[in-house]
Amino acid sequence: MTQDTMDLLERLLLAHGPGGQEDEVRSVCRVELERHCDEVTVDRAGNVVGVIRSEHSTDPDEGIRVMAHLDEIAMLVKRINDDGTLEVIALGGAQPISFGACPVDILGSSTLPGVLSFGSMHNSGSTSQGRDVLTGDVHWSDVHIVTRRSTEELANLDVRPGTRVVLSKHWRQPFRLPNAIAAHFLDDRAPLLATIMAARGVAQRRERLKQDVWFVCTTLEEESNAGAMYAASRLPGDVTIAVEVGPVLAEYGTRFCADPIINTGDEKGYYSREIVAGLVTAAKRAGYSAQIALLVDFASDASAVMSNGISAKAGCIAIPTENTHGFEIIDDAGIEACAATLIEFLLGAEDGPT
């Protein structure tokens, strides 16, 4: 990974992006897609939509939609206690163990500091919160956020039920391991980067492009896939490809390496056989061996769109990721491998997804 690419990944990781409030990460993606696409807009659902048009396309339904999501797992304020602490619930697939006791940013009218707390562990076992933590049976009811502010101060700063709470930028920096990168929110910042790199690669070789390609950075994937369904219902094209992180697990036969995972199905449906085969062929053309997997406990924008009848065909390519929805780890070459496979698929689509 070049230094410029690493710098862009870091900007994406540092940008706040809870579902429904993805403004910071959306801004980064819009600027980057504008470098490569013919046109970039933000639709009414908050999706960033960039298009690279083919000189050879005669049928808009031949277009392909490539989707990676903007949002991250986060928290929502449920209740403000009299002492100014906040009770929170999950936004997306977050669990208390996803973050641990850590600094957070509370996104009121301005960004406020807080600390996600499990309470003191020096207890005799009579405190339910501490007992649950010590036994490993932790629920959102066992945690709270310390703000050190009064309820009046919080109200004046527009902190209320429904306010988003995210991991602080203090803890969002990437961390290097040998031949690997670790960070919170590689889901879905690494796929966003792969999508941006794919847009650049397609733009550089656009004379080979046989159909229009829509690059869509979607909102609200972690919670409902609402952004993807809004975009797909309004954009031309019959094929939707989701770009994701994929779990490295023995039960799926997936390995920690650069080779992209080609998903054949998940909890929202099974992907189109010809699109799966086309992605596998594209990986081979790019110099990689696709990891073909059925990710049962998983879902993506593409499977949501297809299962709701908004796309005739769908597929999903994923970057192999250890520790998903935690402090995630990917191979140094995983983003590049995903981007290279996407480029080959999009430019080779006239050969057929076969």
Image (spheres, rainbow, N blue to C red):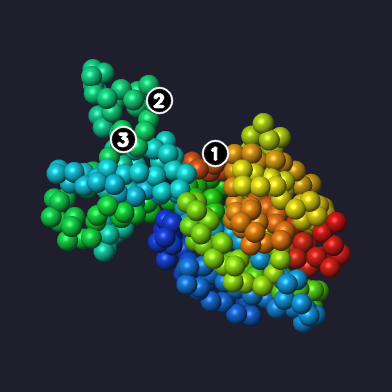
Q: Residues within 10 Å of mark 2 (few under 14, many from 20)?
A: few
Q: Secondary structure at mark 3?
A: helix
Above or below, 7 relative to 184: below
Q: Residues within 10 Å of mark 1 (few under 14, many from 20)?
A: some
Label 1 – label 3 distance at C-alpha: 24 Å
The numbered mark, 2 or 1, whose residue comes first in the sequence reads 2
**Residue 204 shows in this picture:** no
- For discs 2 and 1, the disc positioned in front in the rendered view: 2
Q: Amino acid at mark 1?
A: Asn
* Residue 281 position in % (x across, y down): 82, 54
Q: Nearer the viewer, residue 5 or 85?
A: 85
- Report the residue marked by disc 2: 136
**Residue farthest to the front, as pictured:** 309
Above or below, 54 relative to 150: below
Give residue 86's quadrant in the image.
top left
- Report the residue marked by disc 3: 141
Q: Residue at x 30, y 22 (%)?
A: 131
Q: Residue at x 27, y 52 (%)?
A: 161
Q: Secondary structure at mark 1?
A: loop
Above or below, 203 relative to 246: below
Q: Amino acid at mark 3?
A: Ser
